[in-house]
Amino acid sequence: MSGPKIDHSAAATSEIILDAAPKATSSTVGKLEEARVLLDQDDHEGAWAICDHLIQMPDLPLNTAVKVALLAKEIGQTEIAEAIFSDAYAQITTNLDRIKDPEHAMLPAAEALADMGYYDDAEALCRKAIAQAPDNLTVAVGYVAFLVYRKRENEAVQVADTFHADAKPKFDIAFHFATIFEHLGGKAGARAFLERAETHCKTKTQRARLDFLSASVGLSKTDLDQHGMAVELFDGFAKDYDKQLTKLDNNGPSMVFTALEELQLPKNASRRILDAGCGTGLCAGFLRPYAKELFGVDLSVKMLEISREKGGYDFLARTDLSEIVTFPEGKFDMIVCADVLTYFGALNTVIGHFSKILAPGGWLLLTVENENDPKVPNGFKLYSSGRHKHTVNYMTKTLTGAGFSKQKLLKHARLRNELGAPIYGTLIAVQKPALLFG
C-alpha cells in the first residue's frame, strides 16, 4: 500500500498543492463511482479491487485518498482505511506551513480533515482560507458547505452574506448560493438567497431560474412562459455547451450509444432517424451508421446553428417537442431523446407525440434523471437544477399509456457530475408494436 504522499524532499518552505488536474479528478471520481455501484450490488471483491488500484497510484491526491479510504472502510478493509487516515492526518498537520493556497491547498486539506472527522482542524483551515481569499467564490462555497454539513446553517448564511455584499454580479452570486444551500439540504439558506436574488432579477431567464428553484424549495412560481425561457436559456448556453458538458463528464449520449450496441440493430443505413432535442449534435456521429436520413430538431436556433456547422445531420429544424405541428413530416424508424426530457415534468404529451410519428416496429431510446423516492407526487419532481427527475414506475406507465410494449432495455448509470456529485439517470429503449393482421 502506497497511500497519499506529500513530497518531503522539497524545501521546507515550498508550497503544497493538493488539487489534482481536472481530467485526473474526473477519472478518479468515475472509478470511485464504479466502486460505489459494485458495493451497492454487494460485490465487495470488485469494489475493493478498484479501491486498491486507486490507493496504489503514486500521484493520488491526499484528499482523494481519504475518500477512497472511507469507501474501503465500508467494504470492510478497516485496517488499511485507518492507516490511510492516520498517514493523511499526520501529513497535513506536520505541513501546515506549506499549505498556503486557499483554494488549491487549504480547502482540499480541510475537506480531507472533515471526512476523517477532525472538524475543529477542518474549520480552522476554512477560516484561514476565507480570511486570505475573501473574494474567492470556491473558498466561500467550501466553507458554507462545511457549516451546513455541521448543522450550522445560520452561520453558513452569514458567511455567504458577507461574500455576497461585495460580489458581482449580484443576481448570479445570490442564485449560486441559493442553489448550493438547496443542494446541501439547507432550505432556510436557499430561501434567504432566493429573496436576495429576487431583488436583482432583471431578465426573463433570471426570472425562470428563480421560479424553478423556488418550486424546488416549496415556494410558489410566477406564471411564466417556459417556452420563451427555454429559448433564451439555451440560446445563451449554445456557444459553450459542449465545453460545459465535458466539464460535467456528461454521459447521456454514451448511454444511448451503449444501448444501441447492446440492441445489436443493423448498421445498414436503412432507418429514418429523429434526434429529438439534438442540441449541438452530440449523438449524430454514432447515429449515422444506422440512418439513411438523420433529422435533428431542437428548440434553440443557436444550438441548431452549431449542429449545422458540424455537418452531422441531413436535415435540421426548430421544433417544440410539446407541439406536434412543429415536428418534421412523415414517420420515423427511430427516435433518440437524450438529456432532454429532464426539462419537462409530465411526459405524456411528448411521449404521445413520439408514438404518433414512429412507424410500426420503430424504436424509441430516451434518458431521464432518476427519482428514487417512489412517494413523489405524480412520479416526477422539479429540482434546483431546473430539471425534473422521474421514477421508473412513472416512465413505465407513461410509455405503456402511449402504446409502447414492455421496455427492451432499462439501464441505470451516471448521467453527469453536478456540484461535485454524480447525477444518476435511466436509459429506456422501447419498440412500437408492429401492425398485426388477423
Image (spheres, rainbow, N blue to C red):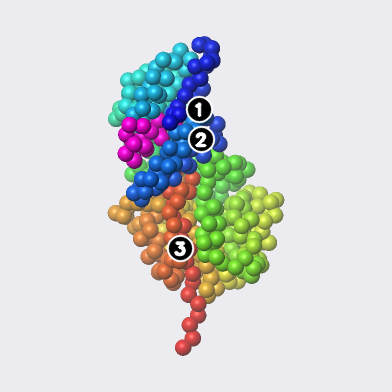
> Mark 2 or mark 1, which has the lower sequence index?
1
Q: Dot 3: what SS?
A: strand
**Which of the 4 image quarters holds residue 358?**
bottom right
Q: Amino acid at mark 1?
A: Asp
Chief secondary structure of the magenta portion: helix
Q: Amino acid at mark 2?
A: Thr
Residue drawn where x is 64% and y is 55% of the image: 285
437 vs 139: above or below = below
360 vs 350: above or below = below
* Pick the front one: 79 or 198: 79
Q: Is residue 65 magenta?
A: yes
Q: Which residue is the site of mark 2?
A: 25
Q: Position of residue 28 (x, y in %)?
A: 49, 37
Rendered image: mark on residue 415? none
Q: Position of residue 342 (x, y in %)?
A: 46, 52
Mark 2 neighbour density, 10 Å: few (under 14) some (14–19) many (20 or more) = some
Q: Which residue is the site of mark 3?
A: 409
Q: Which residue is the site of mark 1?
A: 19
Q: CA distance from mark 3 to mark 1?
A: 39 Å
